[in-house]
Image (tube, rainbow, N blue to C red):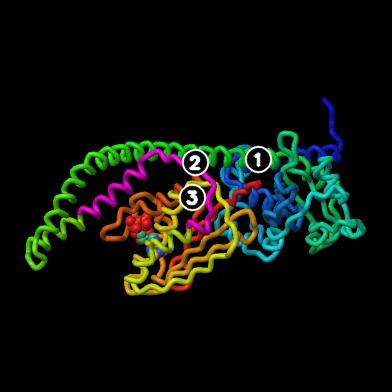
Amino acid sequence: MTIRHPLQHAVVDNRLSELTLLYQFSNTMLSTIRLNKLTHLILTALTMPASGLFERSLIFLRNEKSEILQGMLGVTRQTSEELEIIGEQDSLGSRWDISDEVVNRQRSNEFCSRVRRSRIAINEDCQLIRQVISERRMGHMHECSCLECPVGCSIRKLCKGTFAAVPLVAINKTIGIIVVDNPESGSEITQEQLHFLQLFANQAGMAIENSMLYNQIEETNDNLRDARERLLHGERLAAIGEMAANLAHELKNPLITIGGFAGRLLKALPEETREYSYADTIVSEVSRLEKMLTEILSFSRKPTICFSRCDLLEILQDCISSCTTTLEDSNITLSAQLKEGTWPLSGDPHQLKQVFLNLMLNACDAMPDGGRLSIILDHAPLDKKSAVVSIQDTGGGIPKETLPRIFSPFFTTKHHGTGLGLAIANRITINHYGSIEAENSENGALFKVTLPLAVYNE
Ligand code: ADP
């Protein structure tokens, strides 16, 4: 039997407690898939008084697209309460847990806010970044040596005295870093602590990667579910649309006949009679129904665009003259600021006219007691190759809760509305590679139609 020297005993004991601690850490990290909770558990484990490791710890995660390290969390010893042990204290199956209350307290701490505001560019000129991110080696340095670095990254501004930065590595890539320091006591970080930190970070990297992958799977799953819903909804809408189109088609002919006979009756009857007013009602109701059927048919028909060379200014001037009587009847003053020049478009002028007429007539509907209609034609502020037509009224605007629904087919707040005007206008604009936006501005609604201008070589 070999007898161990007391020093050997101490070394073995130390290794054993280190392994137990690591085992407990790995149990803890496997206990949650929520990235937020995971980062709190990791940093709290490194700073809690019982572990006696570090006074502060910070975590940065790498954004591969923008190549920056984004500060996620900073925990100080004051905010790292003892973690709660779940299971038997000395059993290998035990793990730590953290309450939502502690999580919130850590988040609202000033140091944590500073860390979260920090974004560090992954710049190879910075020795620390190069070593930790590219070479995936732990960086152990003093802020003084960081002061000599010309890059001056945020780590230098956040750390005090000696600090260590360790990469979080998962599947051969650096997904972030953990930084630790001891600003209160100023004590040096020992070799054992660095060794432990490295082992710990290896486990933490894998746990974080798992959590991120899980979140990605969840997000993809949600997107798939949404796409499926949209597809089903689209199929349902298509079936309803087809039925509506068939019905509209069937109804149109008898309606035209009824309207025609009622018109003849109207001409034959003396104006003051009751029969005359009945016939008059039939004529106006039939024309309303006809308009509705035309809208339903134009919405359900597969859009065919005859692209031709046209001019946006001419289209707008046409629409304005079509609206003149409606504007006069409703006591609406018109302010048209149409920038002179050529506004070449490649599109279907009839369909485009429908877009602007719909918007102008909607504006008139919103101002039954008069108001002001402003129409502006100009270039898009940041894109001279696009034109923007703004149509603004003073009709009180669109209620906030209905604003997101106004482009949906059949959404209407009008007694005699079909709810198809904006849906059709939107579809036509999209087919012309443009867009429509609606917002409330001053005391009315503002619709902005953006269309790409065509380039014709004379
Ligand atoms: P409809 O005119 O048949 O109701 P639209 O699709 O053209 O169908 O409009 C949908 C709804 O959007 C309208 O019922 C109305 O509530 C709202 N809306 C559209 N334009 C305006 C506007 N200029 N001011 C206030 N509300 C508007």
Mark 2 C-beta to ligand 1 under 8 Å: no
Quarter where residue 411 is shown: bottom left
N-terminal label among 2 and 1: 1
Q: Point out residue 45 in the picture as x, y percentages from the top left corner.
A: 68, 50
Q: Is residue 401 left or right of residue 107?
A: left
User: Which region is colored magenta?
Assistant: 286-315
Point 77% across, 45% down: residue? 197
Q: Is residue 265 visible?
A: yes
Q: Secondary structure at mark 2?
A: helix
Q: Is residue 399 visible?
A: no
Label placed on residue 207: 1
Pointers 1 and 3 in contact (CB under 8 A)? no
Q: Amino acid at mark 3?
A: Thr
Q: CA distance from mark 1 to mark 3?
A: 48 Å
Vertical comparison of 347 with 368: above or below: above
Q: CA distance from mark 2 to mark 3?
A: 30 Å
